[in-house]
Image (spheres, coloured by chain):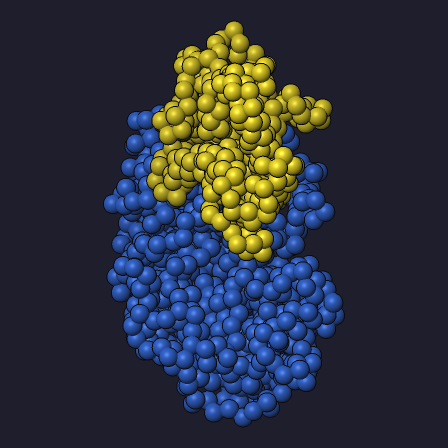
Amino acid sequence: MSLIIEVNKLCKCYKNIEAIKSVSLSIKPGEIYGLIGPDGSGKSSLMKVIAGVLSYESGQLNVFGQRVDSEASAEIIKAKIGFMPQGLGLNLYPELSIDENINFFADLRDVPLAEREERKALLMTMMQLTDFRHRAMKNLSGGMKQKLGLICTLIHKPELVILDEPTTGVDPVSRRDFWQILSYMVRHEKMTALVSTSYMDEAERFHTLSLFYQGKILAQGEPDQILDSIQGWVALVHSQALFVCVQALSTQFTQVNVFGKAIRVVAYDISREDFEHQIKSILARCPKSHYQIESIDLEDAFIGLLRPKNKDQTVKPALDATKPNSIFDTNTLMIEAQNLTRQFGTFTAVDQVSFSVQSGQIFGLLGANGAGKSTVIKMLTGLLKPSKGKGQVSGADLNSSGQKIKENIGYMSQSFSLYADLTVVENLKLYGQIYAVPKKKLAERIQWALQMGTLEQETHTLVGSLPMGLRQRLALGCALLHEPKVLFLDEPTSGIDPIGRQQFWTILVTLAKQSGVAILITTHYMSEAEHCDQLALMQAGKVIAQGSPTNLRQQVSDALGDVISMKVNQPYAALELLKKAHYDKAFLFGKRVHLFSSQVAQTQKKVLALLHQQAIEVLDVQHLPPTLEDVFVHFLESNKIQPTANLKPKESSSL
Amino acid sequence: MKWSRIKTISTKEWLEIWRDKLYLAMAFLIPVIMMVVLGFGMSMDVEKIPFVAIDYDKTEQSRDYLHNFSDSRYFDYQGMAANEKQAESMMDQNKIRFILIIPPGFQEKLQAGRKVQSQSLIDGLFTYQSKVVKGYVLAINANYNQQLLQNWFAKKQGMKPSNISAMLSPVSLETRYLYNEQMSSLWSTGSGMIMLVMLMAPALLTALGVVREKESGSIFNIYASTVTRTEFILGKLLPYIAISFLNLLVLTWMALVLFGVPFKGDPVLYLVASVLFVSCATGIGLFVSILVKTQASAALITLLGTMIPGMMFSGLLMPVSSMDTPAKIEAHLLPGMYELNIVWGSFLKGQGWSDLWGNMAILALYSMVLWGLAIWKFKKRVAS
């Protein structure tokens, strides 16, 4: 079996920045190959190089056995490749309808008319876009754009599809559909797919994957192989005395994180017995606590792989870095929204949203791009007047005292809004003055912010040259200079590497639990939602479910049951078999088949027998609780809310 | 090269322009607005210059002298000012451009046969206009002197004034203006503006059109496909050439109807030359778009790169023959001059193929070089 892609010691530089540092990988026919890593780790560059649209400095690249080293040689392979660049729908034409977009791509690829119509009909039916075929692309929802992008990439029956972050910012239902369609196409059209993502939890979707970090591959192989190569364990600890417990565990372990009401401890290079023993002996000192040991997930593995290199960098602020500056009352209502509604013309961006956040609580607003998260934040921060409904933020009314709200809150936007040409300290000083922090106090607060963000080494570094993780912590420091009691964070962690994300969350938990800050955070990372005390799932401007992560998961468990995850030797055949046997809630994850069942033991027996009949070998079986993504999908489906089109009048982007 | 793929790209481009109302307005309205604003605004005629007079004499003779100015079509008499201070404050407020001062004893001295000195104060901020005003003032003053002399002779010799006129200035010079008989600057600038606008607008539109795809990322559809460079560039440019040609026809109609410029040349030649010029102008935009990455920089570079040479080094404001050598070389290197030769040749001079073929050949060469460069420089496998 010849390889589809062979990359050997490939290097790519942009001026003096090395984007890809001697990367090697090979992709077999029929594989779904994943590139996983944070923003700026070199995934996109590598995909463009392979698609033949970006040149490289050194190393070798063969695609379909063809050496690609010039524009002319790249032209030879392009007919067989479909490439979807990063940025959802950005490569589509907003003024053109679905139909016209597809036709353009087909005609560009010389697809004969009859074949074009046939294939278009097939793909549109599959992606459920037929009813919207005459709608302009600019009026589609994120999920629909993603599907249209996929159709346009697939219209000429490529043998290799290269998809750059196709699932970023898309709602979970569309994401799930996407993976189903992709695996269907790979299976039925003998295609090979190279797909990148920054979501670690999508790793299981791939047959083989490479973990990218700073232009290098940290590890590659099948997801299970990568996990097996790192010896590490997770302990989930529940305790009545959360902080005593955290303090105790921190003396022994470096990776101790608070997830809502649970503490998650990770340790590497240790046997399960030793780890359990250590945990047990520490918890003996903590009253009313219990634990359970789990195997690590890919995000832990990623951090584990980076660990040796980042030994001194993983200095994380211990919980006492910020001394409790006041005793707070956990029952103070800091943020309250009552039937908040915002309309833009005829489009309702936010539809009767209600929730409340108490001091010391982390509240997560979860949803896809365009679900209305940012609009909610804008109303609560006094930047946008609600069309209907009311609310208050630390005692100030939304409808009447917008200015007062602004004085009492900290706000950190997705883009961080730092000044790249100023140094770290200059940025802090500037924000201090903007927030009118008294001069005497400011020096002390800047010192605090530097310490909190472990930025003491970087005080005179230009912000433009800081890595994303540090920038993010600086932005947080800027937002906290005036000691607000309420903090709003609008997608603060998009595209940041797992270590940076973990450090960031440690800080947030400290702020909430020790200083009593009420935090409202939006994110489209399902895995991050686990950190929150309370969650609201948003879709199409509405809150479709609310509760603690555990509570939400329990609701889904009650309704659908748990997941039986089976690793099989013929995943496609297994899935087809199960679907034929009317197991509708069966999904493919790389070489694993996931199946929801309310009676796990019974179903497992039946299914294993069924697979055995067809000589499909089951390599292992696991039982998993529903993930937050499962939760989201469940509530979307039970609410029958279709990801509706985005009809918000956008500012024209031309000029 | 496949025509079907060129057609696909052109059709898509046209649909995008047609549906994006802002872009559509930019494509068709901007040239018209530029034509109106620049055509009327750049008129070089110095007429109806507002002025006041200060008459310290207040006699029949002084009024007679003043009448020579106030009756002239070049001046617009704003009335009498009491003193210099009042007049100068009017000048300060830009209400007038010129003050005429008649000293006391004007009539008395003249009748006594003595020399008298009147004074004119001219706003010197607009040097070109000021020089023209000075010329007018001197001419009117000289004319008045001649009248006085004529009258004196007539009284003295009892001759007919016409005979005396013949004796006093035996050589009379008759000037007739060729091509622009009425010396209407609207004729020259109005038609010349077609060149300037059709240099700027198509270049801008094309540059934005191509860079827009780079900015959004849709250019990767082209990079990643089997479409050739030539197919892409031809497909991309055809709609812009068509739009620009339509615009050129509209501007020509405006020059004829709105500015009343006559058309004396060969319409077929004019149309052929227009196609050449429009492809040249789009070529400039295309070339810029290959070099830059953002719409903002594309707009800035094309505007600066077409407006300044189009105005200063095309012969529109100053004839190329009277430029100094570096400017002259620059004028010959840029397409504006050749198009202006064709436009003025066709509208005002009535020139035909034998006079203008050279200019057309250069425009054709120019666009071929620009397009060739753009196709050569356009890479489907980029470095960043």
Chain for colour yellow: B
Q: At which x and y percent is residue B171?
A: 59, 14
Q: Position of residue A354 (x, y in %)?
A: 33, 76
Q: Position of residue A286 (x, y in %)?
A: 57, 90
Residue for point 43% across, 70% down: A383
From this view, report whether residue A423 is shown above or below residue B320. Answer: below
In the displayed structure, A453 sits above or below A239; it is above
In percent of the image, x 40 and y 69: which residue is there? A384
Horizontal side of residue A440 vs A496, given as left or right: right
Q: So how many labels did they put on this image? A: 0
Q: Nearer the viewer, residue A315 or A351?
A: A351
Q: Is residue A253 in sight in this rendering?
A: no
Horizontal arrangement in the rendering, residue A463 relative to residue A202 (left or right): right
Q: Residue, x 55% and y 85% (percent of image)?
A: A515
Say which chain is blue.
A
Foreground of the two, A359 or A93: A93
Quadrant of residue B334 within the rendered picture: top right
For residue B357, above or below residue A39: above
Position of residue A175 measured from the top left corner of the image (x, y, whole percent): 40, 54
Name the residue nearer the viewer: B114 or B102.
Answer: B114
Which quadrant of the structure image shows residue B375? top right
Q: Look at the image and tell me in which quarter the N terminus of chain A lies.
A: top right
Q: What residue is shown at x 41% (from left), y 23% (from top)?
A: B261
Pick the residue in front: A175 or A291: A175
Asked whether residue A202 is in view, the answer is yes
